[in-house]
Image: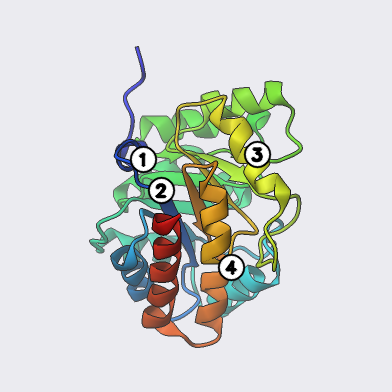
């Protein structure tokens, strides 16, 4: 008997099973005063879920673009409590997934942090620097709060460990497209389609690939193997350049069109 899915998995699975390729978009919370409008624009333009980055002073997996966005947010006074409080009053129409680092989870306490996410309408969490072997306590508290913990599988992850990560992941499985930090690349790494192909053989959860996916053509190429893509740095760069909600909505519409036409 399959466990009962939460909102994130349920909605993504339903869209995938209906033949839609999934688009998960990312924004760093607090990087601009209108960041909530940005989230609304992403959803309205065709994102199937939105990943909300909680800014952190040492974002080890993030490249220069998202690092800069985190500094902008922190300099502007963004805090986890303030960010989640803002989300609590928002009706966005798509599942929200918080992306953060374990230091913030540990400081708040597992149960308190999971409860805060649930109270704010967040249905998923990605704690990027928390390995499977040390994630049990957090995952259990998140499960109890109906917050789905999305786990990552890198191209270098051995099959046996990848299978265990897939078994413990909730919502979707995040396939890491290349070995390195987040950021735009001129060409898609061959490992992006390879990790997607491998994960699709291991799990029935939706498989979405991110890191190094920036353009409609790259997104379409990944979706030939994966159930969907995660796009972050290309959107954040536009916001840093002053594009605003309308500007990122235009890129999301382009990504959506590229994926759907593939």
Between marks 3 and 4, how big is the CA–CA gap? 20 Å
Q: Earlier in the sequence, mark 2 or mark 4?
A: 2
Residue receiving disc 1: 16
Furthest-front residue in this view: 262
Secondary structure under tag 2 reads loop
Residue receiving disc 2: 21
Residue 48 x/y as whole percent: 35, 53
Furthest-top residue in this view: 1
Between marks 4 and 1, how big is the CA–CA gap? 24 Å
Q: Earlier in the sequence, mark 1 or mark 2?
A: 1
Q: Would you say the residues marked 2 and 4 are in contact, meaning their CB atoms lie under 8 Å apart?
A: no
Residue receiving disc 3: 195
Q: Residues within 10 Å of mark 2 (few under 14, many from 20)?
A: many
Q: Earlier in the sequence, mark 4 or mark 1?
A: 1
Q: Would you say the residues marked 1 and 2 are in contact, meaning their CB atoms lie under 8 Å apart?
A: yes
Identify the mark at residue 233; answer none if there is no mark: 4
Whether residue 151 is situated above or below residue 87 in the rendered picture = above
Q: Which of the two discs, 3 and 4, sits closer to the camera?
A: 3
Between marks 2 and 4, how big is the CA–CA gap? 20 Å
């Amino acid at each position: 008997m399959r466990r009962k899915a939460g909102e994130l998995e349920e909605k993504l699975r339903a869209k995938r099973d209906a033949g839609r390729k999934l688009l998960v978009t990312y924004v760093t919370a607090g990087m601009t005063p209108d960041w909530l409008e940005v989230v609304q624009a992403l959803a309205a333009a065709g994102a199937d879920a939105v990943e909300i980055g909680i800014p952190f002073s040492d974002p080890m997996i993030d490249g220069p673009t998202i690092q800069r966005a985190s500094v902008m947010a922190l300099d502007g006074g963004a805090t986890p409590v303030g960010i989640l409080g803002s989300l609590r009053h928002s009706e966005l129409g798509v599942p929200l997934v918080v992306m953060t680092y374990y230091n913030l989870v540990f400081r708040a306490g597992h149960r308190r942090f999971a409860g805060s996410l649930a109270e704010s309408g967040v249905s998923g969490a990605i704690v990027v620097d928390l390995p499977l072997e040390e994630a049990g306590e957090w995952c259990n508290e998140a499960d109890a709060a109906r917050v789905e913990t999305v786990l990552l599988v890198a191209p270098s992850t051995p099959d046996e460990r990848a299978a265990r990560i897939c078994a413990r992941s909730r919502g979707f499985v995040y396939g890491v497209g290349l070995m390195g930090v987040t950021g735009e690349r001129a060409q898609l790494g061959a490992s992006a389609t390879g990790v997607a192909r491998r994960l699709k053989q291991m799990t029935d959860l939706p498989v979405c690939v991110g890191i190094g996916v920036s353009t409609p053509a790259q997104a379409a190429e990944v979706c030939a193997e994966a159930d969907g893509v995660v796009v972050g740095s290309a959107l954040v760069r536009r916001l840093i350049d002053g594009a605003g909600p309308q500007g990122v909505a235009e890129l999301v519409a382009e990504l959506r069109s590229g994926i759907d036409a593939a």
